[in-house]
Each structure stands twice: as structure tokens, then as C-alpha cells.
Image (tube, rainbow, N blue to C red):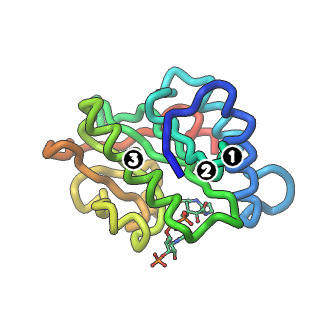
Amino acid sequence: MRVRPETPSDRGAALAVIESAFAAGATGGRPVEAALLEQLWASPAYLPALSLVAEDDDGAIRGYVITTRARIGSVPSLGLGPVGILPEFQGRGIGSLLVEESIYRAEKLGETSLVLLGSPTFYGRFGFARADERGVHPPDPAWREHFMIRALGGNRVPVGAFRYAAPFEAL
Ligand SMILES: CC(C)(COP(=O)(O)OP(=O)(O)OC[C@H]1O[C@@H](n2cnc3c(N)ncnc32)[C@H](O)[C@@H]1OP(=O)(O)O)[C@@H](O)C(=O)NCCC(=O)NCCS
């Protein structure tokens, strides 16, 4: 398995991964994460270097993660997600690889913080911690411990209100 930035020809496979990873949670029809992904690709917040596929030895795409430009107050930050793994390939470490690679690549790009909404148990192992207790406030206060931040490159986390890329606001 190798993780690399997506190319335009990966988009169909990446979308299929997100559609099937989130299908179980959908109430019928297409999961909202699929439409969100298409909007993020078309958004100025899209960062090609942080849009990653997990590619199997046979060239098939098994997992996908996108990280887009966000802000804490007026300071640039990053929002990670959606991330998804094909259901039959979940639980084999691919999601962990994608999260670790996102952190590594964002740090190399000089980014200072990475934020997400997710499971504290899963993301805690990558150094993410509850954001509101560090002064970074989610768009929805009900997110509580699921809204998490990780400082990058030894930087201090800025404080303020977090804003995802615009397509998230329509969710
Ligand atoms: C969540 C997801 C990206 C993790 O990827 P993965 O390749 O299955 O994860 P890994 O194999 O690297 O890690 C597995 C660990 O994650 C945990 N895990 C998987 N999905 C989880 C979830 N939704 N919530 C909490 N923990 C989860 C597993 O219990 C396992 O824990 P263990 O190592 O203690 O056994 C993947 O399962 C997925 O696509 N799920 C459906 C879509 C989704 O929920 N996306 C994330 C939204 S935040």
C-alpha cells in the first residue's frame, strides 16, 4: 500500500471510496460526504498536495482523505476530512496511514495546525486533542470532545473560532 497525492484521474475512484465508506451511515441516497467532496475539489480551499489516496500494489484505490484550508480566527489552519476506506479494507491500518501521512505532509508544507471532527479514541492516537479546551471553538458547540486539533511542527495552537472551508457550512 502506498499513499500519494491524488491526480485528476483518481477522482472517480476516490469518490467511489467515500460513497461506499459512508453508505452505511446514509439514510438512503447518496451520502452527504460525497457531495461535500465534489464541492471541496471545486473550492479555493482545495489543496492538491493534501488530497491523498491509498493505492494498493495492483494500482487500486482503497482509501482517500482530503485536507482543506480552514481558519482559526484569521490564522490559516487546516481541516481534515472526509476520510474513508472501502468497507472490505477497513481495520487493516489504511486509515491510520492516511492520517499519519496527512500530518507529515502538512508539517512539511509549514502548516501550523490540523483540525477534525471525529472519534477521540481513533484520532487521539495520532496526537489530536479536544480543541475547545485549548481555546479553539467549533462551529457547533455540541461537537465537544469530537472536535479535535493537533499542533504541527512544534507550533503553538492559535485561539479563536474555527471555520472550515465554505462547502462544510452548507452541511
Ligand atoms: C474510520 C476509518 C477511516 C478508519 O480507517 P481504517 O483503515 O478502518 O482504520 P485502521 O485500520 O487504521 O485503524 C483501525 C482502528 O480504528 C478504529 N476505528 C475504525 N473506525 C472507527 C470509527 N468510526 N470510530 C472509532 N474508531 C474507529 C478501529 O476500532 C480500530 O481500532 P484498533 O486499532 O484499536 O482495533 C474507516 O473505518 C472508515 O472509512 N470508516 C467509515 C467512514 C468514516 O467513519 N470516516 C471517518 C469519519 S471521522
Q: Is residue 163 left or right of residue 90?
A: left
The answer to which of 36 and 14 lies nearer the viewer is 14
Q: Is residue 39 left or right of residue 75?
A: right
Tell me how far mark 1 sits from mark 3, CA to CA: 18 Å
Q: Residue at x 61, y 50 (%)?
A: 56
Rendered image quadrant of residue 156 = top left
- Secondary-structure class at tag 3: helix
Please, is residue 151 above or below residue 76 in the view? below
Q: Circle 2 is placed at which residue position?
A: 56
Separation of marks 3 and 2 at Cα, in angstroms? 16 Å
* Ligand 1 closer than 8 Å to label 3 CB: no
**CB within 8 Å, label 1 to label 2:** yes
Residue 114 appears at what percent x and percent y? 34, 45
Q: For the residue labelled by badge 1, is the local secondary structure a helix, a strand or a loop?
A: loop
Disc 2 marks a residue whose amino acid type is: Asp
Residue of label 3: 101
Dot 2 falls on a residue whose secondary structure is: loop
